[in-house]
Image (cartoon, rainbow, N blue to C red):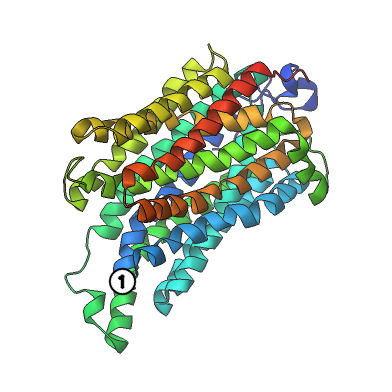
Amino acid sequence: MALMPNASTSTDPATIAEEGGNINAPELRLFVMGLFFIFGGITSLNDVIIPKLKELFTLSYMQAMFVQTAFFAAYAIIGLPGAALVKRIGYMRGAVVGLLTMTAGCLLFIPASKSAVYLVFLAALFVLASGVVMVQIVTNPLISLLGPARTASSRLTFAQGFNSLGTVIFPLVGGALILGGLAKVKAEDLTGDALDLYRMAETQTVVHTYIGLAIALAIVALVVWFNRNRIKGERHAHTSFVEGLSLLKRPRFAFGAACIYLYVGAEVSIGSLIVNYFQQQSVLGVTAAQAATYIPYYWGGALIGRFIGAAVLQKFSPGKVLAFNATTAIVLILLSANTAGHLAADSLLLIGLMNSIMFPTIFSLACEGLGDKAADGSGIINVAIVGGAIIPPLTGKFADVSHSLQLALALPAVCYAVIVAFGVYAARHKVTA
């Protein structure tokens, strides 16, 4: 349904809220939260297609993880150009570009299936992720602008809750569609034409899932297009690429961007270790399939924590809340690494609850005071998300060298320690713009 302006929610420049120059259009918040749900869910589908493609293409674990590499590489490559495009065409048109790019990425799974070539699947994932990056560049600053500046952290945390909801729902549905009918025949038992035909047949479940997503995304893009002029008086600083990077000269922003890199890396590293960690006899000693059933608790903690955090951040300093959560995450890592059984397992899962407010709070604190350079800031921070492609392999290397998953948790702990420092810094250095 098209969003029609009215007297109380008009975004005409004359009715832009005085506090922080933000946009007075509360009904747009639901729309933006819907976008958070969509790109969060699509990102989490990687966890479902990785085991599917691993079996079909008889890949090693490292090769299968190229799915994440292809996906997260888009953040580094598309982040800054995407921010420049959003500044040129505006938030709503930028969202349309992102949604249509995601649609194209979904449709590329059709030729990927017909080719039965793993690299073509990776290319489709990169295009899909490029669209996700564009949508994130729009949504993060837009939700901050849709209300008073003083409650931006709370609003962004609440919106991230819808992102987490997507990460819970999409894998449940996608897992049933994509993994529910794994064939009894194995790719490793086939060769030549028989192997190609098997791959084409089995990847149809992937194709059908992503075609359904493509149709839904195209409909959303159409709705957004009809509302492309909904936000009036939108302002962006038309800076060059080099000028955009100059934001890194601001200590607060540079510190925050570094923390986004470290946070995403730590979160993904811990999530990636859960199955192997719980299989250890000193922890739960369960099978891989049984260990995998605990993963939703990790991400579910982030979901619950974001809705709770949205309320907490309205009453307490965002910097102090961030420092508290990061400190507690370190304590939980130490507890898990030095205990056994369910205590070791539960303390690791509870880190998901502590993670809940970190991304939106770091983002809003880092971008506080950027004004019309918010799109530049959002683009740079989206580049920093590439930490999710770099820190996990380093954590894995640490585990290989030390022969201990418990010791490997030291790297995420160091990441959280830096985030504690940023929270304290932000609490002590207020923006007075």
Can you see residue 114? yes
Callout 1 crowding tier (Cα within 10 Å): few <14, some 14–19, many ≥20: many
Which residue corresponds to the image point at 47% horizontal and 61% vertical from the top-left? 106
Nearest the viewer among 294 and 177 is 294
Question: Could you say whether the residue bearing mark 1 is in a helix, strand or loop?
Answer: helix
Nearest the viewer among 340 and 315 is 340
Q: Is residue 34 left or right of residue 294?
A: right
Q: Is residue 270 left or right of residue 379?
A: left
- Count of numbered marks: 1
Q: Position of residue 2 (x, y in %)?
A: 58, 37
Q: Is residue 65 left or right of residue 29?
A: left
Which residue corresponds to the image point at 29% horizontal and 82% vertical from the top-left? 195
Q: Position of residue 119 (x, y in %)?
A: 47, 72
Q: Is residue 397 above or below residue 306?
A: below
Circle 1: residue type = Leu
Residue at numbered disc 1 = 56
The C terminus sits in image quarter: top right
